[in-house]
Image (spheres, helix red, strand yellow):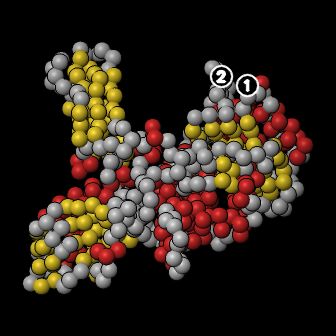
Amino acid sequence: MSMTTTAATTAAASTRAELAAQIDGLIGQPRFAAASWGIAVVSLDSGRTLYTHRADRLLQPASTAKLFTAALSLSTLGTQYRFPTRLLARGGIRQGRLNGPLILRGMGDPTLGTDGSADWADQLASQLAVRGVKIVHGDLIADDSYFAGPPFGTGWEAGDLQSWFAVPASALSVQENIVRVTARPGSAVGLPASLGFDPVEAKPDVLGQLTTILPRAPGDINLYRAPGADTLYAFGTIAANAPAQDFKLAMVDPARVAGRQLREALVRHGIRLTGKLQVLHWPQDGSDLLRHADVLGEVLSPPLWQILQRGLKRSQNLYLQNLLLSVGARAQASDDTVPEAFVSTQDGGIKALDQLLEQIGIPPSAALIGEGTGLSRRDLATPDALVRLLTYLAAQPYAEVLRQALPIAGVDGTLLGHMRGTAAEGNVHAKTGSMTYVHCLAGYVTSAAGERLAFAIMLNNYQRPDGAPGAGSDVGAIAVLLANYRGHD
């Protein structure tokens, strides 16, 4: 029986003392002796604290750190903000001829090429064609230099950078910067297997060989790309007649992929490009190129509230890192002072976050956040800081937008299969956070007495013993106890 099920069948606490005894009993089990718990629960109705356990302890928040980025983007950009992706050029259009270069300028949209904008390249090419352009006499430049700094967050581990959950953050992102790889066996034993790539424009250089072996033999497919390298190494085996196997990897260069897709769209719309495709990355400076350039086409992202919903429900790292970087880029663009030294777009975003946390009343020592996703193990926060943040968010005009953007227990997102059949189902709206040895949950729940609660439950340094419930169930069990709580303060 899981701890969530046990919590659901435990008699509901009717006083704070009974609730504390239930939670203490759960987290005090011998299997947690070497682990670190931190918990804070506050009533949004009365402002009183219902329960704390080492709530001032700094712990790794994992993806609950996305709540900080969500608060920053909502307060800075607003719920209706849309990210533009633009076509720019200098010089007029004469007799169907545009003297290039033609610039594809990314400005942070993490949703480009996903549902709702799968035809983004054709939209831009069509807008260019409507202006009468038939020939671009020059290069096509895919420019993602709007974000100044490396394409990965501070503290991201090198071993993760080929993985779909640690894709490069790019001002010119496309199809979530993921390339899907499909491995199929060869037609006979001993022949090489085939690898397919989607999108095809993201196919990397491939070295090595997957070999087809006897039917029903155990296969061993290995895909490896060294951090910072372009080459994908494929090696191992796949059984003859085995079904296709799918993998998701990080794109090497999203801006280049976007440029290739636009170049193909130009052809489809009868526009000839005389030059080649170039890519402009930081630290290359495109300011001279952009000076006096006119906007010839534009596609817009969904409004920010929808982007947040997609990002928080699925815990999509690209979305939240791009949001942090977008805030940083906007803050730096509006700063009239000349910096004494280079400051990355990410650092600009973190500076804006620190200013927001100061306004909220969260001490700098209680939230040490260095990037936008929680993927970094350098990120640290206290349960108190998370609950103060949630309390602040609950009092803002966009409170319901944020609450609905969070995963809902038993209903959707990363909580889809959790806490079903309990009082928490459909009730708990919370951000999950999970990485090796780290399990967290922070959000909102309404108690059985109708009291609105904000909570942060953080478990660090825990290795689940064989036969024990999953750590997600342990964390969820506390949320269920809160949902069942019949007291009222």
Crowd rating for badge 2 (residues with CA inside 10 Å; few <14, some 14–19, many 20+): few
Tag 2–tag 1 contact (CB < 8 Å): yes
Give residue 47's quadrant in the image.
bottom right
Q: Is residue 465 left or right of residue 323?
A: right
Along the line of sight, the residue nearer the viewer: 40 or 256 = 256
Label 2 SS: loop
* Image coords of residue 166 (percent x, y): 45, 46
* Image coords of residue 71 (percent x, y): 61, 63
User: Which residue does the image show at 78% across and 47% down from the upper left?
Assistant: 55
User: Which residue does the image show at 62% across and 30% down from the upper left?
Assistant: 470
Query: Residue flagged by tag 1: what amino acid is it?
Result: Arg
User: Which residue does the image show at 15% across and 78% down from the upper left?
Assistant: 98
Q: Earlier in the sequence, mark 2 or mark 1?
A: 1
The answer to whether residue 331 is visible is yes
Query: Residue flagged by tag 2: what amino acid is it?
Result: Pro
* Image coords of residue 281 (percent x, y): 34, 60
In the picture, the disc for residue 31 is: 1
| Gap between marks 2 and 1 measured at Cα | 7 Å
What is the quadrant of the C terminus in the image?
A: bottom right
Label 1 SS: helix
What is the quadrant of the N terminus in the image?
A: top right
Along the line of sight, the residue nearer the viewer: 481 or 70 = 70
User: Is residue 31 placed above or below 262 in the rendered structure?
Assistant: above
User: Is residue 287 placed above or below 174 in the rendered structure?
Assistant: below
The answer to whether residue 106 is visible is no
Crowd rating for badge 1 (residues with CA inside 10 Å; few <14, some 14–19, many 20+): few
Along the line of sight, the residue nearer the viewer: 473 or 365 = 365
Total marks placed: 2
Give residue 276's quadrant in the image.
bottom left
User: Is residue 311 placed above or below 160 in the rendered structure?
Assistant: below
In the picture, the disc for residue 465 is: 2
